[in-house]
Image (cartoon, rainbow, N blue to C red):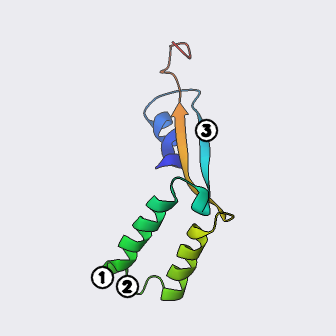
Amino acid sequence: MGRKLPGLLRRAGLVDVDAEGRVITLRGASSTLAPIYTKSHEQLVARSDARGLITDEESAAFLRRMADPEFDMTGQTMMAAWGPRPGTEAGV
C-alpha cells in the first residue's frame, strides 16, 4: 500500500500531499533482524503451498547470505504521507 498512500490521501480530499519513504538496510548475521528473516524463511519454505516456488539451492543460498555478517540487503520501505484538509493551514 505504501506508494499508493499519496494518491489515496488526494482522493480522500487532502491537498498539498507529500510523502517520504525510508528503506531498512540489513547486514546479514550482524543484523538484529537476521533471526526473524531466517525463521520466517524456514517456516514459509516448509509450507506445502510454497513447494515449487523456491528451489532447495535458492533456499540454501538465502540462508548462507543471512549467516554472512558481510552480506548487505535492503528490507521493506516504510512510507509516510501527509497533507492538510482544504481550507486549513498545513501543520495545524
Residue at the far left: name it.
48
Camera-side residue: 51 or 4? 51
Residue shown at the point (59%, 36%) measured from the top left: 19
Camera-side residue: 49 or 15? 49
Name the residue that disc number 3 marks: 20
Instruction: Name the spot of residue 57 as percent of width and height, x first.
Output: 54, 87
Residue shown at the point (50%, 19%) measured from the top left: 86
Instruction: Name the spot of residue 68 as percent of width and height, x first.
Output: 63, 68
Q: Judging from the image, what secondary structure is the residue with disc 2 in?
A: loop
Count of marks, rendered view: 3
Q: Judging from the image, what secondary structure is the residue with disc 3 in?
A: strand
Three-letter amino acid code at disc 1?
Answer: Ser
Give whichever of discs 3 and 2 has the lower sequence position: 3
Camera-side residue: 40 or 13? 40
- Crowdedness near tag 2: few (<14), some (14–19) or many (≥20) residues, C-alpha within 10 Å: few
Residue shown at the point (45%, 29%) measured from the top left: 13
Q: In this picture, is 64 found above or below 55?
A: above
Q: In this picture, is 18 found above or below 70?
A: above
Q: Are the two marked residues, 3 and 2, in contact with CB atoms closer than 8 angstroms?
A: no
- Crowdedness near tag 3: few (<14), some (14–19) or many (≥20) residues, C-alpha within 10 Å: few
Nearer the camera: disc 1 or disc 3? 1
Three-letter amino acid code at disc 2?
Answer: Arg
Q: Distance from label 1 to label 2 (Cα)? A: 5 Å
Three-letter amino acid code at disc 3?
Answer: Glu
Q: Distance from label 1 to label 3 (Cα)? A: 38 Å
Q: Is residue 37 left or right of residue 50?
A: right
Name the residue that disc number 1 marks: 48
Instruction: Name the spot of residue 47 as percent of width and height, x first.
Output: 32, 77
Q: Which mark is residue 33?
A: none
Q: Are the two marked residues, 1 and 2, in contact with CB atoms closer than 8 angstroms?
A: yes
Name the residue that disc number 2 marks: 51
Give whichever of discs 1 and 3 has the lower sequence position: 3
